[in-house]
Amino acid sequence: MDRIKILIVDDEARMRKLIGDFLRKKDYEVLEAENGRKAVDIFFEHEDGDISLVILDVMMPVMDGYQTLKEIRQYSKTPVIMLTAKSEEKDELQGFDLGADEYISKPFSPNILVARVDAILRRSNAIGDGKRLEIGGITLDTGAHSCTIDGRETDLSFKEFELLQYFMENAGLALSREKILNNVWNYDYFGDARTIDTHVKKLRAKMGEKGEMIKTVWGIGYKFEA
């Protein structure tokens, strides 16, 4: 069986080596790029789905991480972890709005980064088997990472898919923003709750009339009701 490929994009060779060494210890195959333009070239040289995850620095020459993510997202839902020295909330929201799946500020623990890589790959089914959820005309196939609404294929980003899956698995329960962040993003998140609101807004729009099934619970968060 082919090893899972991960693309590391950072203009610092030392950082690429540090991350790469930890990933190789977990038997991942590592590809490297020193800037966004090179990363896009490498990404699209491979068949769709061949690269299972991208670890992407924000501040880089030639093409920054935001523009790189934007180009990848035009054609692919491959999970992307953003790395940045910035800790401004607006920068994180920009990354999430463009389709980032995780946001990690430098400096960070390589072991924590690898743990998040493992978690994302499990949830995206690069590792492990999938399952099927059906509620109110919405069908999620976590193995194929596909969503159909009333029989119509609906294109969701990786994080939108995870968010809808979490809602469906907890249908009828009022879920706080903190609980959603800790379960869908898989770590304690201390930023503004607008991260959730941004994703819910986009998810509702893609779901059309079914978006009304995601109810706002004022003062708490959200509830999924068929």
Image (cartoon, rainbow, N blue to C red):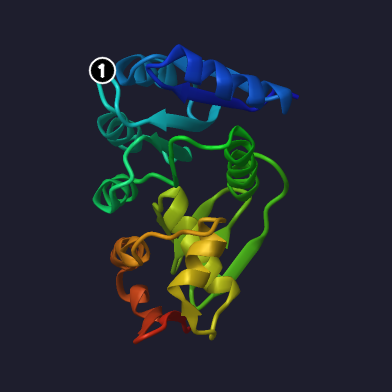
Residue 41 visible: yes
Q: Residue at x 51, y 53 (%)?
A: 146
Q: Residue at x 31, y 39 (%)?
A: 86
| Callout 1 secondary element | loop
Amino acid identity at mark 1: Pro
Label 1 packing within 10 angstroms: few (<14), some (14-19), many (20+): few
Q: Which residue is mark 1?
A: 61
Asked if residue 198 is positioned above or below residue 117 in the image, the reply reads: below
Q: Residue at x 43, y 60 (%)?
A: 190
Q: Residue at x 60, y 54 (%)?
A: 142
Residue placed farthest to the front in the image? 107
Q: Position of residue 141 (x, y in %)?
A: 59, 57
Q: Is residue 105 left or right of residue 90?
A: right
Q: Position of residue 174 (x, y in %)?
A: 49, 84
Q: Position of residue 191 (x, y in %)?
A: 37, 59
Query: Which residue is at the front of the view, 99 or 132?
Result: 99
Question: Disc count in the image?
Answer: 1
Quarter holding the N terminus?
Answer: top right
Query: Which residue is at the front of the view, 85 or 123?
Result: 85
